[in-house]
Image (spheres, coloured by chain):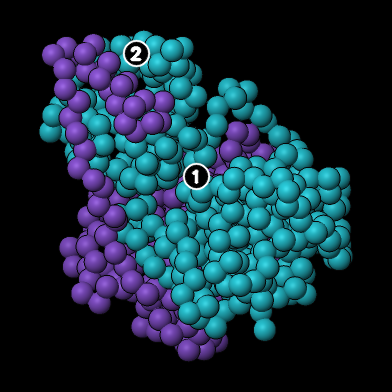
Chain colours: A purple, B cyan
Amino acid sequence: MNIVVCIKQVPDTETQIKIASDNKSIVTDDIKWVMNPYDEFGVEEALRLKEKFGGEVTVVGLGPKRVTESLRTALAMGADKAVLITDDALEGSDSLAVAKALAAAIKDLEYDLIFTGQRGVDDDMGVAGASLAELLGIPHVALAVKVEVAEDGKSVKVHRPVEGQTLVIESGLPVLITAQKGLNEPRYASLPGIMKAKKKPLDEKSLSDLGLDSAQFGQEGRKVKVLELTPPPERAAGKIVEGETPQEKAAELARLLHEEAKVI
Amino acid sequence: MAQGVWTIVEQREGEIRKISYEIISEGRRLADALGQELTAVLLGAGIKEKAAGLGHYGADKVMVADDPRLDPYTTDAYVAVISQLVKAGEPALLLVGASVQGKDLAARLSANLDVGMAQDCTAFAIEDGNLVAIRPIYAGKAYAKVTFENSRPQMATARPNVMAINEPDTSKSAEVIDASFTLEDSALKTKVAEVIKDESGKVDLTEADKIVSGGRGMKGPENYKILEELADLIGASVGASRSAVDAGWRPHSDQVGQTGKVVSPNLYIACGISGAIQHLAGMSTSKVIVAINKDPDAPIFQKADYGVVADLFDVVPALTEEVKKYLEG
């Protein structure tokens, strides 16, 4: 069973986001870049399936050279090889353009399953996975918390929670699955894993290597244009609920929620 | 030229979901700003009788795609049908609810149509005849204002609980049109093998009107009982911070924050949650925020409309009793 896992590199979730002077991007100077947390679940699931069914796990990343670090992390966890799509012309691409580049890099690989994170915790779009599947002409199932591949390795059942219920979706292979929290507990890279990862193959591809026209990528190629970034709206200053005892405070809070905020 | 506003209606087991009324109402406002018609697109099986009522909320027309293979929702079937309808009807705007289903549909449909799409928006406006959307990014640590150049339809999903629902006007009804489409069985590559219902009857956090949430200060899973009592009383769902989920006290589906659910209820009561940046990001669009915490320096108080500095184990049960008086009053 050959599996592809797509990896995005994002600012660590601890990051305080500061808007740059162009008002269209963020300040990246002090950012600690990490593998998108949802992608870690995809890597882990791929490794578990490889342990059961055999085959190879290929991780595919896209972005500047620093993304190599996240790919090496996946290799250290146990993936076999990596592809980095890197090209200055990609800077500022939107989700659909990213999906197009990923599709071009993946279409000639052999794969039975593709994993992506359910969304990047940076732009929160959650679009690249489904779009990639559409461009590759394969089905997708989003938001997996459980993946059961049939013993014959020919079909899969995926559990996906929607509001108030869990749907069990059945699909043939190949299929793309987007991973979310609850799917598994990602392993840490071991020291021998980290040593081995240094020798595993990591191919770099530019847009022209993939036969793509750079005019379709980057800021110029965006179909969704960013006009402006702003900090979140300021909330009006709150009040501390007064009272001598917790009981008094509770009574005052109930009154405020009923009379002032009118939510109870 | 592309013309008109379309909204995709979401139904489950034949019942129209609340998010659908939200986007029809918002679609009406945008259609008025453009001086164009609003069409609601309703997919399902045996669903036609629900169509005319969508006019009460502002739809001029309802296009009904009725086929047994359109219920329950599958991405394949919905994308195949809506793609045909959009190519034939050429709307200027296509709005979808940012529910789990809507986000899934919009993500794939935008690639199918090769158009730009803005996910999980919290506000829309028409400027110079074009859609401008506001969407939180980094789970709300920043907001992006976006538009769609040279890409039609302009496509966006709207976050649940954000768009106001129009007062239904029963004197208005929509013109119902049978949609013309073909659906090949070969296009259907996935199927719903089983539906496992959550029997708790609780509304999902992303759609909840009220949320009572507990963090590390809850000290253990058994103590969530006091939050559940309050939640049951006021019709709230129960959420949790990441540390509570990682400790195994609550299921993953309850986590609010940047790596969990992003929520925007009318009332969010944070109990024993200090307010890590990732948590604050995930609940900052809540309309009224209450924080109950022993530590007066907890960052959660910076976001709270009402802060109670006290032990939650004293305050929460007392609050439940006090609220009862108003509800029974």
Position of B312 relative to A201 (above/below): above
Which residue is depicted at the point 34% across and 61% down?
A: B143
In contact (CB < 8 Å): disc 2 and disc 1: no
Which residue is depicted at the point 25% across and 77% down?
A: A22
Expressed as whole percent of the image width and height from the top left, the position of residue B47 reads 82, 46
Say whether residue B52 is left or right of residue B250.
right
Expressed as whole percent of the image width and height from the top left, the position of residue B191 reads 76, 47
Q: Quadrant of residue B279?
A: top left
Position of B212 relative to B164 (above/below): above
Quarter of the image containing the N terminus of chain B?
bottom right
The residue pinned by badge 1 equals B161
How many neighbours does mark 2 have within 10 angstroms: few (below 14), some (14-19), or many (20 or more)? some
Q: Quadrant of residue A148?
A: top right
- Amino acid identity at mark 1: Asn
Which residue is depicted at the point 82% across and 57% down?
A: B176
Labels 2, 1: front one: 2
Decide which of A113, B259 is in the foreground and name it.
B259
The residue pinned by badge 2 equals B322
Decide which of A11, B116 is in the foreground and name it.
B116
Say if residue B148 shows up in the picture.
Answer: no
Say whether residue B46 is left or right of residue B136.
right
Mark 2–mark 1 Cα distance, whole angstroms, equals: 27 Å
Q: Secondary structure at mark 1?
A: loop
